[in-house]
Every structure is written in structure tokens, then in C-alpha cells.
Amino acid sequence: MSQQNRLITSKQIRRLAFISSQAFSLHNFRGSLIRSLTDKGVQIYALAPDYDEESREKVRSLGAQPLNCSMSRAGMNPVRDIIDLCRLARQLYALKPDATFAYFIKPVIYGTLAAALAGIPHRFAMIEGAGYVFNEQLGQTCMRRLLRRFVGRLYKLALKCAHLVFLLNRDDRQLFVDSGMASAEKVVLLNGIGVDLAHFSPEPPQSEPLCFIMIARLLREKGVCDFVSAARIVKSKYPGVRFLLLGSIDENPGSLSQEEIDGWVTEKLIECPGHVTDVRPWVKQASVFVLPSYREGMPRSTQEAMAMARPIITTEAVGCKDTVVEGINGFKVPVRDPEALAKIMIYFAENPEIIANMGAMSRAMAEAKYDASLINAEILSKIGVVQ
């Protein structure tokens, strides 16, 4: 361990501020980590810009204090971002936490810089995926290259101010270290953010009718269009197969429109209930989980489906490929290849007897790699909270 890391882990963290751009994620994605910290007596401030009463109450139920902050999640207005950074620095200075823990792109960049300006002693960042601008599968237009260079410089500036940077796959570690956005001695590699294996318990897979489920933000780079194109191919041969798509329209530039989603539903290619607060009843209806994404950190939705004993079909993309052992708990297909995706789906339709065994292997892998209690313990150890 480096001298810097020894210094960090020798300190006690008694007050910690989580910084997020989405309030619902504090409970949904960071809930078990926040609970682990509050159980250790750490006072948690949970900062996000979009609280409603439901998300506020859920954060309070974790033992944390929900606080509004000023931050746009996906906008590219530098003036607004600088104003928000200054406001956040003042807010952190007033709160005086011992540490900050920022996640998602904007909180990592502007939250970490604000914490440094406010003189917060310890600053931690979690990068769950390199993000839209680093996705090479989307092509390299002039605008994307400029945006990538701009975001890369912001990352480099912010992560110089971070004491630890948590990453979720080896490809992202290589990207951030080789490009100079993060120094190797600061990087901690995790097996994803983990899932509560008791909450996401194994369920017998639905086999009649066969049902494929995809859970993701409704972005083109998540492979939603490939999922729908594959559904069209499969339904031409097996019209009774169901296709469930869970997720919501997003502010991201790659978001699909509601008209596109409604058109697919009208065509009876998919069922799309939108965003749901509890995915378990929907995964319970499914036979196989599908995520044809173009790049991920370590997809939480896939981990949840694995914990519930579902086979996985995903792509060979960064982050996705790490969740499947080919032919054991599922299959990998090339990125942006709906024909290959449909071929694997048809294989499941014609060989349904493999679903239960592959699902059992997914559960075993989730227990070995994605147990949130083990991953949380590692994070607490790294940031200096006594176990």
C-alpha cells in the first residue's frame, strides 16, 4: 500500500457526504453501503439535486440525512456547472464532513473539485463506467473527440484531488491510468458495486412462455434497438415469446424517444412498463436476462438477474463480458449484432432445458463475486472505517 493510502486508512471517518446527481440512486445503488456506514456510527449526508418526498424518506430510512444540492445531471452548460461547483463547495464547507464519496460523472468531477475547494480532508470517487464520450462503439465524430478530450481533462483535474478512485473493471482501469486521468496508486478495483443476495434471491425461471427481459436506461448505447430488432426476428419464428423492456426515457443525448418505445409496444414486439421501483417481480416472470450494451462499468442489472438465477445474454463489450462465462451461465454476442443476439435467443427457445442449470451457475457466480456485504467491507476498509 502506498504512503498516501496508509495515511488515509489510518484516519477515522465520522462524517461522510455522498454526492450524487440522482436521488433515487442513493437508496437503490448505495443503500447497502450507506447502511454499512451508519451501522458503524458514521454520520451520512446524502446530497442530490432531485429529491422528492419518497426518495427523501428512503434515504432517511438508511439512517442518512438527505440534502438538496445544485447540479444538472446531463447538461453541458459550463457557466451553470461552475456556479453549481461554487455552491457545492460552500455547502460542503458548512457541513464540514471528514470525507466525500462521489459517484456518476458530474458528481465525481464537480463534487470532488468542490470538496477540495472546501478543504474536506478525504475525497473518494467511484466511476461505475467511463461514460458516453468514451464509448468507441458509437463512432468517433469530431464533436465526440473534442468532448472526450474535454471530459478527459476534467477527470484528470478532479481525480488529482481524489485520494482513492474506485473502478469496476480492468479495461476502465487501463483507460484511466494509461491516459493519465488517474494515477495507478490511487485506483482500487472492485467486483462491481454488489447486490444484496438475500434481497435478490433465486427464483425458478419462467419457461412457458419463454420470456427475455432487459433492464436499462432507454439509451441507444445500451443496445435497446438491438434487443427490439432481435425480438422482431425471434417473433417471426416463435410469436409466443415475450420480450420485457424495463427502463425510462433519459436526458442523455443517446436517449430513445417515447414515440419510438410506443411504436414497438403497438407493434407487439415488446412490453414496456417503464421505470419500476422493484425489478424482482419482473425478473421472476423472465426466463433469460439480456443486456446488449456497448460499454458498461459492471452492470448492476445483470448482477441482480444473476443473483435471481437467470442465464445471461450480453455482449463482448467492456464490463459486460466479465459477467458471463461462455456456455456456463450464458452467452456473449458481438456488439451491435441483433442477428447474433436473435440466434442465441432462438437457441434458448429450442433448448429450454438448459435455462435452469445456467441460471444456477449465475447464482453461484453472484455469490462468489457480487456479494454486496463483501464489497462494502472492502470499501469501508479502504476509506478507513474500522470494521
Image: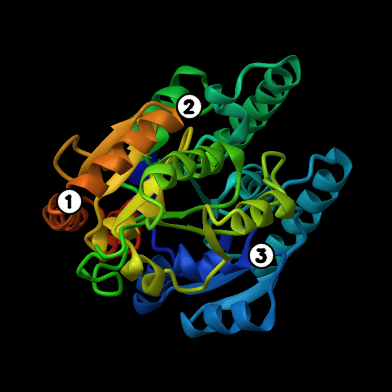
Location of the C terminus (image quadrant) = bottom left
Q: Which residue is mark 1?
A: 365
Asked which secondary structure carries label 3, the reply is strand
Q: Residues within 10 Å of mark 1 (few under 14, many from 20)?
A: many
Residue furthest out toward the right: 79
- Estimate the spatial distance between the alpha carbons at disc 1 and disc 3, rounded to whole Å: 33 Å
Q: Which residue is mark 2?
A: 176
- Estimate the spatial distance between the alpha carbons at disc 2 and disc 3, rounded to whole Å: 26 Å
Asked which secondary structure carries label 2, the reply is helix
Residue at the spot x=53%, y=70% of the render? 276
Q: Please state the horizontal and vertical placement of residue 140, each as a whole percent of the image.
A: 64, 16
Asked which secondary structure carries label 1, the reply is helix
* Residue 223 in view in this figure: yes
Q: Residues within 10 Å of mark 2 (few under 14, many from 20)?
A: many
Q: Is residue 227 left or right of residue 32?
A: right
Q: Is 207 rendered above or below residue 330?
A: below
Q: Is residue 307 left or right of residue 126?
A: left
Q: Please state the horizontal and vertical placement of residue 184, each as a whole percent of the image.
A: 39, 27
Q: Mark 2: which amino acid? A: Phe
- Which tag is nearer the camera, tag 1 or tag 2? 1
Q: Mark 1: which amino acid? A: Met
Name the residue nearer the viewer: 17 or 15.
Answer: 17
Q: Please state the horizontal and vertical placement of residue 334, each as a whole percent of the image.
A: 38, 26
- Estimate the spatial distance between the alpha carbons at disc 1 and disc 2, rounded to whole Å: 27 Å
Q: Which residue is mark 3?
A: 48
Residue 110: quadrant of the picture = top right
Q: Is 212 rendered above or below residue 340?
A: below
Q: Are marks 1 and 3 in contact (CB under 8 Å)?
A: no
Residue 79: quadrant of the picture = top right
